[in-house]
Image: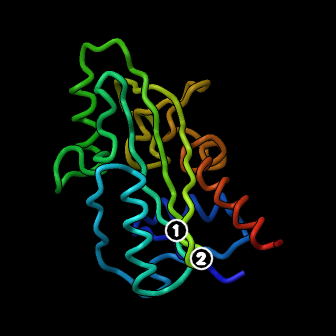
Amino acid sequence: MERIVFVSNNEHKVKEVREKIGSDISIASLSDIGFSGDIPETATNLEGNAEQKANYIYQRYHCDCFADDTGLEIDALDGKPGVYSARYAGDDCNSMRNIQKVLAELQGKKNRKARFKTVICLIFKGEKYFFEGIAEGEIINELKGNKSFGYDPVFVPLGFEKTFAELSSETKNAISHRGKAVKKLLIFLLGKKDA
């Protein structure tokens, strides 16, 4: 099977996906195809952003590719930060500022339920396919762990006592939102490979 481009500039995400997929399929990064620019993300939902990013690379390189978008949805904040998770504290923010804003908005709230949701848009042989993964959990009051990125240090997945940032990459990949979406993508691609 030809390689498939993962439309992401986030090296952490590329590493996660490569670990999840293994050697069954060759995953190329944007740097592997010589792309280093910014890709617009102007949709109002995760599906739209994933599709927009995949379209952007497909139209320029005409290669099989997939893009994802992920959001953290917090019940007590009416589903926010959602599609704006990466830039919740402003356009020039970083993960720490995003976390600080979320924790400030959750002060005094008893309901800490939240979920990570990932949507993948795959363009394969010119056709589009979507895959979704959800990880339920809750937001804790303090940061714990340093093995991951984004909101992971304050998100404890359902059934666990450790945050995503404290879990091994193998454990996180097995239960995470992105891991679940990538598993569906892999099953689809392996089915096409054997067809």
User: On the image, numbered disc 2 is attached to which residue?
Assistant: 4
> In the drawing, what numbered circle is on residue 58?
none
* Residue at 45 percent of width and 66 percent of height: 11
Report the Cα–Cα distance between label 1 and label 2: 7 Å
> In the drawing, what numbered circle is on residue 66?
1
Q: Quadrant of the C terminus?
A: bottom right
Q: In which quarter of the image is the N terminus?
A: bottom right
First in sequence: mark 1 vs mark 2: 2
Asked if residue 74 lies left or right of residue 124, the reply is: left
Looking at the rendered structure, the kind of residue marked 1 is Phe
Looking at the rendered structure, the kind of residue marked 2 is Ile
Q: Where is residue 31 in the image (x, y as percent from the top left)?
A: 44, 81
Determine whether label 1 and label 2 are within 8 Å by CB. yes
Question: Among all residues in the image, which is located at the extreme front?
Answer: 127
Asked if residue 166 lies left or right of residue 100, the reply is: right
Give the camera-side residue of 134 and 122: 122
Q: Compared to 48, does 123 lie above or below?
A: below
Q: Compared to 10, does 83 lie above or below?
A: above
Q: In which quarter of the image is residue 20?
A: bottom right
* Residue at 50 percent of width and 75 percent of height: 29
Q: In which quarter of the image is residue 186?
A: bottom right
Q: Position of residue 82 (x, y in %)?
A: 34, 41
Q: Position of residue 66 (x, y in %)?
A: 52, 68
